[in-house]
Image (cartoon, rainbow, N blue to C red):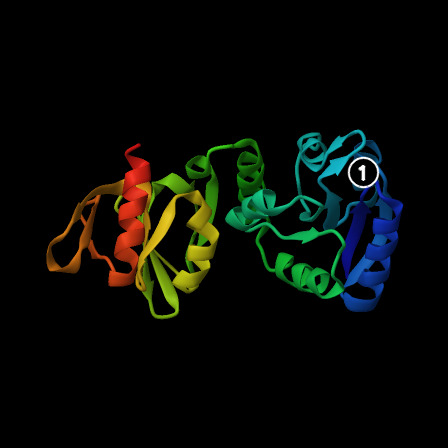
């Protein structure tokens, strides 16, 4: 059984999570609750949980304050948050599970299932990336986790030059000439990175606008990137791309 602790300063959220865990997460054993950062620290030291459902913002501090106060983090975390889109993106970049308030029980069950599959050493890197992303106001400086079969890569979003579709996979081309193959379709990275200065120039290519060197009008239109790659631009994307060029040069 996965020893689980709830830390949230809203009593009705704790009640809801308690009820949902009992009904939808049979692999979980609830060992305690806390209503503040201070109480949470004491509960973690006393109860030794394997999973903590942690509110981000509480009356006496944040979930990150709590994590910083610990000598080591030997448990998994699912954050519970009322934050909106900009913060949700930070979670997705970092591959850290989160639940938006009001909590959906099925999303809770899925998050519990996912979090147990992550190695603790990898998880610490994800938590650090998440905290960095909350602090950063520049999208291209945010950290992103890229997971392959062999490795978990942590890099700045701005170090991605372009993403290339490879069937159900995506190949990430980076500034250090790495090509990282991820078992996710390009559509997912388009949705994840479109607010960070990326543009889908073609059904097979998602480019980082910061890495454009020039646009060539010949042969229907091509884009030359900072690593020398020449990529085609779809006809229906050409006008939109040229409009973006105008904004980039203003």
In percent of width and height, residue 61 lies at: 75, 30
Q: Residues within 10 Å of mark 1 (few under 14, many from 20)?
A: many
- The image quadrant where one finds the N terminus is bottom right
Residue 105 left/right relative to 85 = right
In percent of width and height, residue 129 lies at: 53, 40
Q: Residue furthest bottom?
A: 167
Name the residue beneath numbered marker 1.
40
- The image quadrant where one finds the C terminus is top left
Residue drawn at (51%, 32%) of the image? 137
In percent of width and height, residue 45 lies at: 79, 38
The foreground one among 97 and 211 is 211
Would you identify the image quadrant in which residue 55 lies?
A: top right
Residue drawn at (17%, 55%) of the image? 221
Residue 196 left/right relative to 248 = right
Any part of residue 179 in sight: no
The foreground one among 136 and 67 is 136
The foreground one among 63 and 74 is 63
- Residue 112 to residue 132: above or below: below
Residue drawn at (70%, 33%) of the image? 70
Secondary structure state at the residue bearing disc 1: helix
- Residue 113 to residue 81: above or below: below
């Amino acid at each position: 059984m996965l020893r689980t602790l709830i830390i949230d300063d809203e009593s009705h959220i704790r009640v809801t999570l308690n009820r949902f865990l009992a009904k939808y997460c049979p692999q979980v054993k609830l060992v305690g609750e806390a209503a503040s950062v201070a109480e949470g620290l004491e509960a973690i030291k006393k109860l030794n949980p394997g999973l903590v459902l942690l509110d981000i913002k509480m009356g006496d501090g944040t979930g990150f304050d709590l994590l910083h106060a610990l000598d080591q983090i030997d448990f998994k975390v699912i954050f519970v948050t009322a934050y909106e889109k900009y913060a949700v993106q930070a979670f997705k970049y970092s591959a850290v599970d989160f639940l938006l308030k009001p909590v959906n029980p099925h999303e809770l069950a899925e998050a519990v299932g996912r979090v147990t599959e992550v190695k603790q050493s990898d998880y610490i890197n994800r938590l650090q990336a998440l905290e960095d992303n909350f602090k950063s106001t520049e999208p291209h400086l945010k950290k992103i986790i890229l997971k392959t079969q062999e490795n978990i890569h942590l890099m700045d979003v701005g170090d991605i030059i372009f993403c290339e579709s490879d069937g159900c996979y995506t190949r990430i081309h980076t500034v250090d000439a790495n090509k990282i193959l991820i078992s996710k379709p390009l559509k997912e990275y388009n949705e994840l990175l479109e607010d960070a200065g990326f543009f889908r120039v073609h059904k097979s290519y998602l480019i980082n606008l910061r890495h454009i060197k020039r646009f060539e009008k010949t042969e229907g239109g091509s884009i030359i990137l900072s690593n020398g790659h020449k990529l085609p631009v779809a006809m229906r994307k050409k006008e939109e791309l040229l409009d973006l060029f105008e904004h980039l040069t203003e």
